[in-house]
Image (spheres, helix red, strand yellow):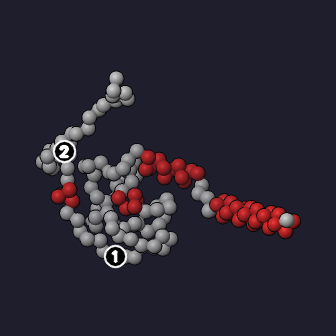
């Protein structure tokens, strides 16, 4: 019975040592909070660029005179605060922690996916609204 108790205590000690190692690794890999806040602020209110902006990823585009308040597509696809290689397009896979292989993504014709655009009325018909705002929590009353 004494040996069993000793084994249980030894397991607890080993688990504690593993946790201490994990804490030290987390402290070494921590990100300075000002950098994290700047990154979060740049991503906080946008999911895509406004419809009238040009694609800065195309060759020959001039760099803007200001830092846009929204991230571009490539920046959204990068991980670990925009320091890793960009992720691939939908369907492409690669191992985590290893740089993505440099593959040429197929060209996509975005005109066929264009929906209603309030700034460009010639870009497709508006989608029908099917959302019904029903906030009745007790429909049987």
Residue 103 - label: 1
Does the rendering let one see residue 30? Answer: yes
Asked where in the image residue 85 lies, by quadrant, the reply is bottom left
Is 89 on the left-hand or right-hand side of 14? left
Residue 34 place in picture, x, y as percent: 57, 50
Does the rendering let one see residue 17? Answer: no
Label 1, label 2: how many angstroms apart (C-alpha)? 35 Å
Residue 114 place in picture, x, y as percent: 20, 53
Residue at 64% x, 60% y: name it: 26
Residue at 23% x, 68% y: name it: 107
* SS category of the residue bearing label 2: loop
Q: Are marks 1 and 2 in contact (CB under 8 Å)?
A: no
What crowding class fits label 2: few (fewer than 14 Cα within 10 Å), some (14-19), or many (20 or more)?
few
Q: Quadrant of the N terminus?
A: bottom right
Vertical placement of residue 107 versus 137, above or below = below
Q: Give the residue at mark 2.
A: 127
Decide which of 1, 32 is in the foreground and name it. 1
Decide which of 133, 3 is in the foreground and name it. 3
Residue 53 place in picture, x, y as percent: 28, 52
Decide which of 75, 19 is in the foreground and name it. 19
* SS category of the residue bearing label 1: loop
Residue at 33% x, 64% y: name it: 90
């Amino acid at each position: 019975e004494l040996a069993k108790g000793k084994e249980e205590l030894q397991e607890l000690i080993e688990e504690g040592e593993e946790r201490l190692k994990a804490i030290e690794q987390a402290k070494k890999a921590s990100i300075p909070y000002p950098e994290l806040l700047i990154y979060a602020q740049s991503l906080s209110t946008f999911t895509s660029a406004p419809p009238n902006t040009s694609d800065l990823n195309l060759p020959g585009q001039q760099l803007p005179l200001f830092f846009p308040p929204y991230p571009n597509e490539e920046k959204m696809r990068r991980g670990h605060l925009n320091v890793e290689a960009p992720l691939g397009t939908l369907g492409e896979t690669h191992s985590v922690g290893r740089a993505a292989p440099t593959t040429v993504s197929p060209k996509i014709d975005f005109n066929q996916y264009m929906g209603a655009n309030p700034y460009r009325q010639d870009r497709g018909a508006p989608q029908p609204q099917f959302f019904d705002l029903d906030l009745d929590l007790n429909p049987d009353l």
